Amino acid sequence: MSTPEIDERFDDLVRELRTIPGAPDELRARVRALGERQPEHPRRPRVGRLVLVVACLALLGVAGIAAVYGLVTSGGSSTQEKAAGTVAGSGGAIRGEPNRVPRVHAAAKRPPKATFAPTTTVTLSAEGAAVNPATLPPTQARLQQYGATMLLRVKGVNGLSRTTARAMRITRSLGGFVASVDYGTPNRKSGESYLTVRIPNARVQQAVVRFSSLGVILSQQISIRDLQDEANHEAVQIIRLQREIDRLVAKLRGSLSPEERVQTQSQLDAARAALRARTEQHAGTLRRGRLATFRLELTTRKGAVVPVHHGKQGRIGRAASHAFGLLAKIVAGGIYTLIVLTPVLVIALLLLVASRLLRRRGAERLLARA
Amino acid sequence: MTFRSARIGTREARPSFAAAAEVHLDAVYRYLLLMTRNDATAQDLTSETFEKALRAWRRFDPRRASARTWLCQIARNTALDHFRGEERRRRREEHYAAEPGEAAEPQLPGPLSAALRAGLAALSAAEREVIALRVLLELDGDATARLLGISRTACSTRLSRALQKLEEKVGDDVHA
């Protein structure tokens, strides 16, 4: 009679308790009427399934955004790359960012056309990674001031010494000269060497290639300043001054009053002085246009790593790289948010558990009193 | 009586609400009757329980609990709401009335002896509840413990004490 776990001595009690009647007919009819009604609300999807679907959609959305971002920021077709490599019209400057290396390469393959900015600067640099040499050549048809700064990594102090000497030999072999050398090895393991060399503009491309082979290029900056307009202006001024001097000399040969002679002589002296200054300035401009300045910094620093060949990456590769970069940022953001929100979530969870516990105890007390 | 299966296949058979109500109506009513000791209140609470169950029927998952246990859980919450309301009403009356009116003694229907009725009246609702679940509804120890939110051991102890107390009360009444 008794169910398991109920002591047999309570059998009579149990038997009598089980005589408590069931639901009366009136109640049964009410509940049956309820049962004939269909549930009012349509069946809703389960919360867990809904969360899963939302999470999947969110993941797909993030992946889609990353893919679109990667494609948009990976650069356009080869036409776009060439366009990026073309030197800007007037007053502009091209500045290549570390992740824009392929664009600079496009520039290197295709020399700039006949339109020139007063100054064009191309910078290649990468934190801890090597970059490829950019052989942006000067245009022979115009007078240009060419400057290049290269940071190269070499192996060890012995390598630094050999490389410095080799750079000097290269300079001489190209018809240039070494303007300055600053070589220092503060300890046995590391050292740095700074060279400023002048190379004829006609040999700039060879110089870039040969200097690039001295070590791993860590950063590179090339600047081209157009001097043609400046030189033309100086030449025109020189011709004008020459004509003025000729006129004044002719005037002095004629008949002049003593005051006029003194005044004309004074003007002639001033014009000759101006001509000398202008001629020297023009010679300097021509010199600057003939010789390119290379500043080489050789270092043994081990901050750099294995070269990364950005130039060989296609558009798909860049797009994937950018997309993964964005995904990494999103994941990092998510983790950061989680770290920030974790204490709040833990407190909320504790409050929830505490409230449920209190509610349960309240119910226990209530039933004990009732 | 027809049992419609809402889901067929990998999931457990899920009875229709009407079928579940038909099968478990007596159990729910008896459970609430023993807790409240009042037939009218038990009927009202039973109706309320099944209305709530109908609204929440889509959330019933037979893999997590039997229909009887699920309905008893709803009935318990309904009864707790009722007791809370009653307590609030009693406090209000105590606050405003100099002498609270004598409430009518609830009556249990059925062929119960006077001694048993008196014994049950001496028990608390919590004690009557465990008797109802284990003795009348014949729920197993685990299901009862889960329903009450206590451990299985605590559930057994509570049942044993409640029956012991009831036995003593009935015995005292008979001797008297």
Image: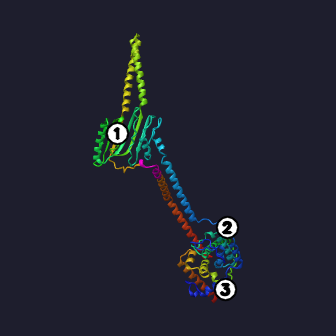
Question: Gap in Å between the C-alphas at discs 1 and 3?
Answer: 117 Å
Camera-side mark, 2 or 1 = 1
- Rendered position, A96 above or below B37: above
Question: Gap in Å between the C-alphas at discs 2 and 3?
Answer: 45 Å
- Dot 3 amino acid type: Ala
Can you see residue B102? no
Q: Foreground: B12 or A316? A: A316
Q: Bounds of the magenta span?
A: A310-321
Q: Foreground: A304 or A81? A: A81
Tell me the quarter of the picture where residue A44 sits: bottom right
Helix or strand or loop: what does disc 3 sit on? helix
The residue that disc 2 covers is A40
The residue that disc 3 covers is B114
Q: Residue furthest bottom?
A: B175
Categorize mark 3 by other alpha carbons within 10 Å: few (<14), some (14-19), many (20+): few
**Residue B21 on image: x %, y %:** 66, 75
Helix or strand or loop: what does disc 1 sit on? helix
Helix or strand or loop: what does disc 2 sit on? loop
**Residue A238 on image: x %, y %:** 40, 23
The residue that disc 1 covers is A207
Camera-side mark, 2 or 3 = 2
- Rendered position, A277 above or below B147: above
